[in-house]
Amino acid sequence: MENSLSSARINRTKLEIVQGDITREDVDAIVNAANSSLLGGGGVDGAIHRAAGPQLLAETRQLGGCQTGDAKISGGYNLKARHVIHTVGPVYRPGDTTAPQLLTSAYRRSLEVALENGIRRIAFPCISTGAYGYPSEEAAAIAVQTVCAFVNQQEQITEVHFVVFSEPIYTTYIHMLQRVAATYGHRPA
Ligand code: AR6
């Protein structure tokens, strides 16, 4: 599904909701929903390591792990993307008040690392919403609000893709993006 509601513009940045496999994204950097070891795993992490090839693990072994809410960068190897930004979202536990802050931090730190490395086009998966159990709608709200607030304050990042796997979440993201972008003055084309 492609329609005018699947994208929005804030400041210099085009934001787009994409349904599909993040390993196929033709951007400067894709973000990996990793664990703190940075040694690979299942879900999107496993898919990224498979698509990038074994050199990715050889590099991430040297990165010294990553704390929850932080982000580190590596090469993209066999991916179209030249870089992978590895972040670690929180494991969701109901009633845990630190989870929203840590998920916000995972998005923000990924964008800060992108700025530090001259990256202009970046794609995010739905961090923490698989094995880590974060409810998809709450996570989508945090993802869209955090990214919109960040891109409104900078000029370098020109494109952000939110890559979602499933149709119901695609629709959730579209509604969320239009609602949040409207608060920055965006109107659908
Ligand atoms: N492209 C885009 N999205 C994907 C893909 C893909 N190829 N594959 C899965 N997703 P998860 P987490 C979606 O579990 O919850 C790993 O083992 C998936 O549908 O990958 O942050 C790590 O090593 C879901 O919406 O990440 C960690 O141990 C989203 O990606 C742990 O899982 C995130 O699901 C991290 O858990």
Image (spheres, rainbow, N blue to C red):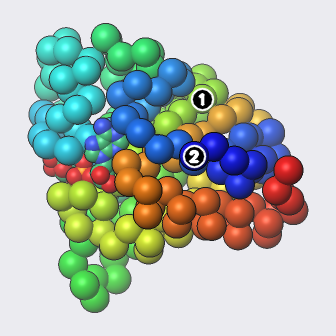
* Residue at 70% over, 70% down: 179
Classify mark 2: helix, strand or loop: loop
Query: Which residue sits furthest front?
Result: 1
Q: Amino acid at mark 2?
A: Met
Q: Residue at x 39, y 34 (%)?
A: 22
Q: Along the polypeptide, which appears first: circle 2 or circle 1?
A: 2
- Residue 96 x/y as whole percent: 27, 83
User: Which residue position holds label 2?
Assistant: 1
> Secondary structure under badge 1?
strand
Which residue is rendered at x = 79% and y = 69% of the image? Answer: 183
Q: Quadrant of residue 97?
A: bottom left
Location of residue 36 with respect to 62 vertically, above or below:
below
Alpha-carbon span between mark 2 and mark 1 = 22 Å
Residue type at mark 1: give it.
Answer: Arg
Rendered residue at 14%/43% (across/down): 42
- The yes-or-no answer for disc 2 within 8 Å of ligand 1 is no
For marks 2 and 1, give the one nearer the viewer. Answer: 2
Residue 111 appears in the rendering: no
The disc label shown at residue 121, or none: 1
Q: Residues within 10 Å of mark 2 (few under 14, many from 20)?
A: few
- Residue 188: x and y, percent? 82, 56
Can see residue 164?
yes
Horizontal relation, residue 33 to residue 185: left or right? left
In the foreground, 135 or 110: 135
Q: Is residue 29 above or below residue 71?
A: above
Q: Position of residue 117 (x, y in %)?
A: 53, 24
Question: On the rendered structure, is 114 left or right of 23?
Answer: right
Label 1 Cα neighbours within 10 Å, binned few <14 / some 14-19 / many ≥20:
many
